[in-house]
Amino acid sequence: MLVLVFNAGSSSQKSCLYDFDRERGRGLLTISNRGVGKSILENPLEPLWEADIDWTGSEEGGILTVESNNIEQEIKLENRETALEILLNTLIEGETKVIDSLDEIDVVGHRVVHGGAKYSQPVKIDADVKSAIADLIPLAPSHNPANLEGINTIEKILPKIPQIAVFDTAFHTTIPEPAKVYPIPYKYYEQGIQRYGFHGISHQYCAQRTAQILQQPLDSLKIVTCHLGNGCSLAAIKDGICIDTTMGFSPLEGLMMGTRCGSIDPQIIIYMMQEYGMDVEEINQVLNKESGLKGVSGVSNDLRAIAKAMSNGNTQAQLAYDIYLHRLKKAIGAMVASLDGLNALVFTAGAGENQSLLREQTCGGLSYLGLQLDLAKNDADPVDTNISTKNSQVQILVIHTQEDWAIATAAKEVMSAEAIAVKSSK
Ligand code: ADP
């Protein structure tokens, strides 16, 4: 089965093509995932082809980078309208060609950031699903339109190919009401103001991969997954089901991030409006783009640059890092409280996978919970590895998050389930 994955963000478009048949016979592991049915996690495959559009470089156009056949090619894009067609053409033409015709693709899986309270599973896209994604645009103004753009382009170029939406919010729909409902007048909850959570595809993948690596059933584990990229969030996962997370109504709540503030006293916003005369746009800009590591350090949103500045004695950079670490440890404690215990702590995404000092200082501060880090393993660039000592009561893992692979697997599962349903109805 050939599965094309579209992972569109506000300023980027990542795509890849997986060929499930080419690597048939690789290890499969069935993980019982109580309440959600059986979920099959296959060992991740390498994509046959990868393409990345970066829209941040210039005003109008972007840069498309394609990798396949051990070749990397860069193409300048003039505008957004034709970009996805050019991207798809690199699958069937030139040095990056990997298939003869786009019709060979069996299914397209899309990462859709916001599925609201409605979607708790991946779904086949039809007119209703598209209008639901459009209705949710006010909740994800920079992401859901890009997701719809990708869906519509595929529909136009490849009208017969089924498309599957895999939602970043879906994994969190199991969060119980005490963790989901904000303590504001209840009518707002009824109008959709609630904690949704994000990074769900990554958190779910990491939980499943943890069970696989530890060779333990997922429904016997209490896991805290730490997705630490530019955006940062934690999830508390019990028996494979998410019961709490740090992001909320939007991806602004929770941990301190690269440029986002995370949780702050909401009165600060009222004060800024009243005392500084700031309007909605200005507040949005400050809290989403000018806060977090960047805002406190004045150096960068990137932990690598922060670390460098710290080693040069920059006290603002040191403060930014100290706040980041303090809030991370505090939030892990909150997730453990939601779980009533902990079997595994998982680090993933850019900072989680690569910042060994951050992992060391986080775990060091939580040794009373039974975490014992193996310092040598932690420093050895671990990937999909258990980095705790033999005697550690809680396992500590570094997992390379593979959202695209998780989307491809989910799209394939939806198609397989549909094929079984059609067969049994005959
Ligand atoms: P995004 O959320 O944009 O996908 P990433 O997952 O790439 O972000 O994470 C970005 C963060 O990860 C930055 O703070 C960066 O410093 C850190 N990071 C990424 N790669 C490395 C690396 N090789 N070494 C240390 N830190 C890294």
Image (spheres, helix red, strand yellow):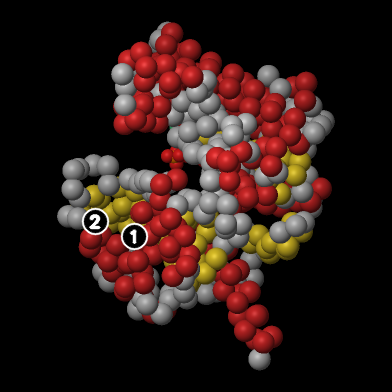
In the displayed structure image, the side of residue 32 where residue 253 appears, left or right: left
The number of discs equals: 2
Q: Which residue is more in the foreground, 370 or 380?
A: 370
In the displayed structure image, the side of residue 32 where residue 284 appears, left or right: left
Q: Amino acid at mark 1?
A: Glu
Residue holding disc 2: 80
Q: Is residue 307 above or below residue 15?
A: above
Q: Is residue 393 above or below residue 412?
A: above
Give the residue drawn at x 63%, y 50%.
Answer: 173
Q: Amino acid at mark 2?
A: Arg
Quarter of the image that includes the C terminus = bottom right
Q: Earlier in the sequence, mark 2 or mark 1?
A: 2
Where on the picture, by quarter, is residue 199?
Answer: top right
**Disc 1 residue lies near ligand 1 with CB under 8 A:** no
Q: Circle 2 — which element?
A: helix
Residue 48: where, in percent of width, then height? 44, 64
Give the residue drawn at x 20%, y 50%.
Answer: 61
Residue holding disc 1: 149
Residue 240: where, in percent of width, then height? 72, 50
Residue 330: where, in percent of width, then height? 64, 23
Label 2, label 1: how far apart the Cα atoms are: 10 Å
Which of label 2 and label 1 is nearer to you? 1
In the displayed structure image, the side of residue 251 where residue 153 appears, left or right: left
The circle on residue 262 is: none
Say whether marks 2 and 1 touch (CB < 8 Å). yes
Q: Is residue 5 above or below residue 305?
A: below
Give the residue drawn at x 52%, y 69%.
Answer: 124
Count residues near mark 2 (Cα–Cα under 10 Å), then give few for <14, some for 14-19, many for 20+.
Answer: few
Q: Circle 1 — which element?
A: helix
In the displayed structure image, the side of residue 158 where residue 204 appears, left or right: right
Where on the picture, by quarter, is residue 373?
Answer: top right
